[in-house]
Amino acid sequence: MAPDIPVAALIHISDLHFGSIFHNREHWFHRIAAKTPFQGLFPHDCQIAQALSHVINNLAQKYSVKNTPVVVIHSGDLTRAGKNAEFSVGSTFLHSHFDEAGYCVGLRMKRSSERSMACVDPAVFDVPGNHDLWDRKHPDSVFRDHYPGPYPMEFRMQLNSKATLVIYGLDSNRSKLREHRKAKGEIDSRQLERICSHLQKDAEERHSIRVVALHHPLYDPEGASSATSRLRLNHRENVARRLREAGAHLVLSGHVHVPAFFPTTGDRPAHLIAGSGCQMGSQCSINAIELVDQGAKSIRYDYDPQKLQFCASVETPIKY
């Protein structure tokens, strides 16, 4: 296969923050409160969600016409506060659709666990964020129905006669409720040891492309607020170093609602952070990542509130 033709495409989205009803719209008080810490509690905006559905479905169609396999990776915070009704709205958006003014709004994609390794239909690979766990103590919570675990979880896709795509999912949320609600993250030692073992084993296969998804980023993006320092992943430098040493090519995350890219270095893998997908008051953006045998290209799409659509803005080459 020619090096400039993608062997697969990843559509990276994060922090959708779906509320309990789909028809949410931003109001003037949301724009005022967007500059305060309360902004993190805002739900989605249905108009932005409609634009998000449109751009993802168009991208998936574009790649499918070229017989390029597509996986949508959602790196956490599907819901605003982990409520059952919010999971219902989020799940409908990812796997079914809403009827919105005569348009079908939603991705209608299978879960990655529901498709075979050789299937070419687009699928969604989803890891939890801190907002998704807020109601996990309730006996009727649907959190484990949506995120059954255990972690790390894996999804494998045969791309061609040589290459295999392996996506690993981590749960980076704190186990203690008080610490969890501070939005800090942590990869426990069991998860870290297991994923490094799996990465090392897969790295022995010369033509495997290895991608890790988790909610909390490994680094602070430029332009993030001072509050970002309180949202960090514990021991993140060690996590980054271990993932790089074990053979991770690319790490995808969200959480801070500020898009960013960090290139590969000697002690860290390439790292992409997505902005929020459709939360009110957030910098909304997604990443379309085209994988080739020896690297990748990321195209960032930012939401334009004047055009009411996501537009391509930044193209970044990624070296493993």
Image (cartoon, rainbow, N blue to C red):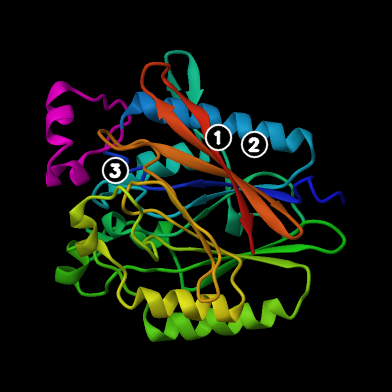
Above or below: residue 205 compared with residue 92 = below
**Left or right, residue 260 beside residue 22:** right
Residue indicated by mark 3:
85
Residue at label 2? Answer: 60
- Percent across and percent down for residue 173 are 31, 68
| Residue found at x 40% / y 30% | 49
Residue beneath disc 1 = 56
Q: Is residue 242 left or right of residue 38?
A: right
Q: Is residue 201 magenta?
A: no
- The magenta stretch spans which residues? 20-44
Amino acid type at image mark 1: Ile
Relative placement, left or right, of 153 versus 135 is right
Residue sitting nearer the eye, 110 or 232: 232
Q: Please state, as top left, top right, bottom left or bottom right, where the C terminus lies in the image.
A: bottom right
Rounded to the nearest angstrom, the CA distance separating label 2 from label 1 is 6 Å
Q: Where does the image place residue 220, in percent across and percent down from the top left?
A: 33, 59
The answer to whether mark 2 and mark 1 are in CB contact below 8 A is: yes
Helix, strand or loop status at disc 2: helix
Q: Is residue 138 visible?
A: no
Please name whichever residue, 203 or 225, is drawn nearer the observer in this view of the structure.
225
**For the residue carrying disc 1, how many other residues have a C-alpha within 10 Å: few (<14), some (14-19), or many (20+)?**
many
